[in-house]
Image (cartoon, rainbow, N blue to C red):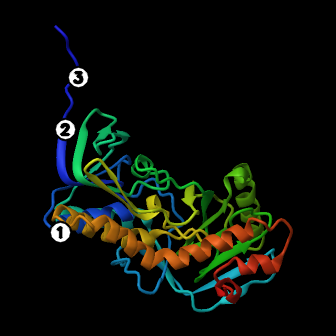
Amino acid sequence: MATGRVTTIERADVLVLGLGPAGASAAAAAARAGLRVIAIDRKREPGRPVQCAEFVPAIAGIEVGDLAVSTRQRIRSMLTFVEGDPPDAKADFPGHMIDRAAFDAALVAAARHAGAECRFGAAVRRIDGDGAVELADGRTHCAGVLVGADGPRSAAGRSIGRVNAELVETRQITVPLAEPHAATDIHLSADIPGGYAWLFPKGEVANLGAGVSPAFRRRLKDIVGRLHARLVERGRVGPRVLGTTGGPIPVGGMLEAAGTLAHTLVLLAGDAAGLANPVTGAGIAAAVHSGRLAGEAAAAKVGGDQAAGAAYAEELRDVFGAALDRAVRRRHELACVRQRDRAALRRGWIAYPEYWTA
């Protein structure tokens, strides 16, 4: 008598992959519309381990939600150091330094309150051509709409041929901050190829890190270490390293955010859709906003709107397209900088008027 493993198939209206800001926002929006929503994440708990610089700039027209529970410090301005020169100050550059784990946990709690089933420790093994999602434990999920909010190397995106081809690799350490600081510090140099270094204050500590093109990944530890040593020498930060993290950021610009697998509509949100800014790497606000739009589009599709996916992709282009296209151009220009060309570095950074010219 033949024996075999029995496959458990669970069905929902909407299946969300990833419970970061994009996924949790999508799950909440779809659940509020009265749909059965299952959202899964391979992590064991929301937001941990943290792989984020934790700065949320204030972006006009983009609603991030209630940051009160997770804000650890308000940011007022930006200081940009070009090749170690004295900083150029941008006085009006507001934002929030958040506790990313607390931020994610609050979004997941809101999704659960709306009625979404949020499950952690659930890794995706594969996505079939009919849209069925098989988990590592053998369970299979099927849904009319699949929302891919599973990061820059999205399995959902890969299933419909949408892949973030350009990434930046990052390394970040958390260090004691010697004195209060209300600005984000940005360090631009030809010695940081394809990216920049930063110091983001968060109360009594600071996140200090750098991002580079993948070809230079092995230099990251040295880049961050040298900046740390320099700031210790100047009395800005302490020598202790309180934590280390890192991860990839998509920098190739926005992908086509909707596709199909048989009868399943697939929507991509956040980093999975390439919405992180290719110059700054900022992506939290875009993740929350796109996640909400994806959840609403999922509800429209389940309700019978066959154009919901196309409308969602068009709305993302309307909201983010121009800014991301400019950032991609500036990033590609910076890729050609091999010498200490201060003018070129300034043109490639958002704090300078040159960045915003045609």
Q: Name the amino acid, label 1.
A: Arg
Q: Is residue 165 above or below residue 349?
A: above
Q: Is residue 213 above or below residue 69?
A: above
Question: Residue 55 placed where, x, y %?
Answer: 51, 73
Few, some or many residues within 10 Å of mark 2 (<14, 14–19, 20+): few
Image quadrant where residue 305 sits: bottom left
Q: Is residue 8 above or below residue 178?
A: above
As rendered, which of 150 and 81 lies closer to the eye? 150
* Structural distance between the alpha carbons of marks 2 and 1: 24 Å
Is residue 31 left or right of 357 when viewed as pictured? left
Q: Name the amino acid, label 2.
A: Ile
Residue shown at the point (21%, 30%) measured from the top left: 7
Residue shown at the point (73%, 80%) measured from the top left: 347
Few, some or many residues within 10 Å of mark 1 (<14, 14–19, 20+): some
**Residue beneath label 1, please?**
32
**Residue beneath label 3, please?**
5
User: Is residue 122 something that shows in the picture?
Assistant: yes
* Structural distance between the alpha carbons of marks 2 and 3: 12 Å
Question: Residue 45 placed where, x, y %?
Answer: 35, 52
Proximity of marks 2 and 1: CB atoms separated by less than 8 Å: no
Q: Name the amino acid, label 3.
A: Arg
**Residue beneath label 2, please?**
9
Image quadrant where residue 27 sits: bottom left
* Structural distance between the alpha carbons of marks 3 and 1: 36 Å
Residue shown at the point (32%, 71%) measured from the top left: 311
Is residue 118 left or right of 155 when viewed as pictured? left
